[in-house]
Amino acid sequence: MRALGHAALLLACGCAGLGVNKRSPANIANGALTPTLPPAANYGPDATKTCPTAGANGEVASLLAEQSQGKTPPQQDGRLCEMAETLLSWDPAELPPDQVLSFLSFYFGLPQPARRIVITSIESEDVRQLAPPLADGVQSFAATAALPRYGLSTQRVKKGTTKVVLVMQEGTLELEPVPRKLAPGAQATLSGRVAGPLENPKVTVSDVLGHFETPKAEGKSFKAELRCGDKRGKIVVEIHGEEQGSEVPAANFPVHCGEDPPTSVALAPQQPEAPAAFEKKLLELINAERSTAGLKPLEWDDAVAGVAREVSEARREAMKGGSSVPSDIVQRLKKVDVISPLILQNSAQARSAEDAATRFLMSPAHRAHYLSAEATHAGIGAAALTDAAGKPFAVVTELFVKELQPLDVAELREKLYGALARRRSGARAPALRKDAGLEETGQKYATELAAARGELPKPREKELTSPLYKQFLSVNVLGGAKNDPLEFAEEPGVLSTGKVMGVGVAQGTHPVLGKNTVFVVILIGTRR
């Protein structure tokens, strides 16, 4: 049999396996992949996970030792070997997508997703012929890696044919074991050091609610506490090291609080999802995580989604032509009458809604956006595209905004009367009686103020209030818009001299506070 060279091995990446596997290291059924090997309890080194020392593994290790010329050869890692064994079940004519590789990496306790994968078939069963191209593949990776690690698994699929899976990863992180799951209220210490050329580790810890902190590190070492509160969800850890002035990712993994880590991963559909289905599914995944964290679900806003779709399409065209990406999100939203004091944006490229959700989950900054307690509405836009290999993916834009809810205006007006009475009582100012005339004028004033987006012309203000002076000696006017309309009761003007008062309340769009802003007008007067 002819042994495949290194170039042929790499060209064969992703080729389908031939025949049926004799062992089943993973089940692929009903649109999901489920490993049959047990999961790791911790991230970090695991002495219980080992690689075979005989067969192709032993032969490759011997070749690497011979080729190292006295230097430390690339090392096998039991976690990578178990990941490689699991991928023996992967038969599609393409490499596993990122979401599958991330899931398997975390499942077997790897703190950084392994991305360098070879899955192919070699026309030989002789380990002496299998080993050279596999060793060449590892050495090629090692040429650009500071501390290369690898895992290898092989399987005879039919006479004269062996399926091989090679998983490779940089080993520039030395991590003390960290539990993959913590009970509610529990905590664990995250500690370790960056190795090889990496210096000055930067650790970011995103808690269940998406709030993140960056504990200080010293030299190559780092230490931080991971704390689960009383809510279920995920803590996300991200670690970077510095190499020649540039940040290099060293780890990025989730720790589950009060919930079990997943034991299977959904596979992307064979056919690309329609953009509308992709968008709605992604929002469902976001709201599922918000619900777990005890946050209110985000409401879909068609206008915001339209802008998100425009941005994704503009990014797609920019990618095709190499032009700049538009950054006029605020102006685009204003054109569709969406004005918000909060505008958060996430952007990515993904194969599926699940893939996009995973990418945003693993980024503390993106995660903070979709877990924002201030955000109330969302719009997601997906623009379809194909990569250089002709495989479909989507350019994704998520927009999160804060929109006030419609209120019962009459109920709020009564609450304001109560708040004003309490404020004056607390300040020992004389109590004010409700006045129907002042309330009627105040309500008309507030309604027109809301219709004018808070900018009622001065002549019109005068037209509204001038008739009052036929019946009142004095009238003090206090009005405007606030995030919390009850805060008007704290204004100094509500303590002004008077005998009666009237309150007007209306909702409209404010140029800063956005839709459904509450406009309030308070009139305090003394009758003739």
Image (cartoon, rainbow, N blue to C red):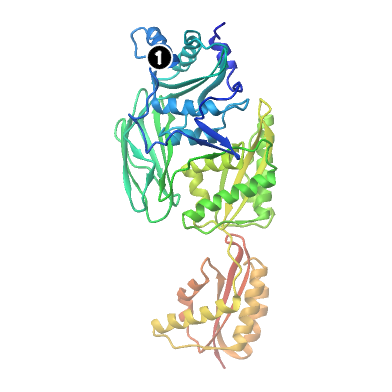
Q: Residue 147 appears at what percent x and percent y?
A: 38, 21
- Name the residue furthest bottom: 528
What residue sits right under mark 1 in the picture? 58
- Determine whether 298 is above or below 317 in the image: below
Horizontal side of residue 451 vs 418, given as left or right: right
Q: Residue 144 appears at what percent x and percent y?
A: 45, 18
Q: Which residue is at 52% across, 24% downward?
A: 117
Of 367 and 186, nearer the camera is 186
Q: Which residue is at 45% across, 74% downward?
A: 490
- Determine whether 493 is above or below 203 in the image: below
Identify the image quadrant of the N terminus.
top right
Q: Residue 155 appears at what percent x and percent y?
A: 51, 20
Of 354 and 212, nearer the camera is 354
Q: Residue 186 appears at what percent x and percent y?
A: 33, 50
Horizontal side of residue 80 vs 307, given as left or right: left
Circle 1 Cα neighbour tier, 10 Å, few/some/many (<14 / 14–19 / ≥20):
some
**Type of amino acid under label 1:** Gly
Secondary structure beneath label 1? helix
Horizontal side of residue 30 vs 419, given as left or right: right
Of 521 and 263, nearer the camera is 263
Identify the image quadrant of the C terminus.
bottom right
- Determine whether 426 is above or below 9 in the image: below
How many numbered marks appear? 1
Horizontal side of residue 88 vs 235, given as left or right: right
Q: Quadrant of residue 219?
A: top left
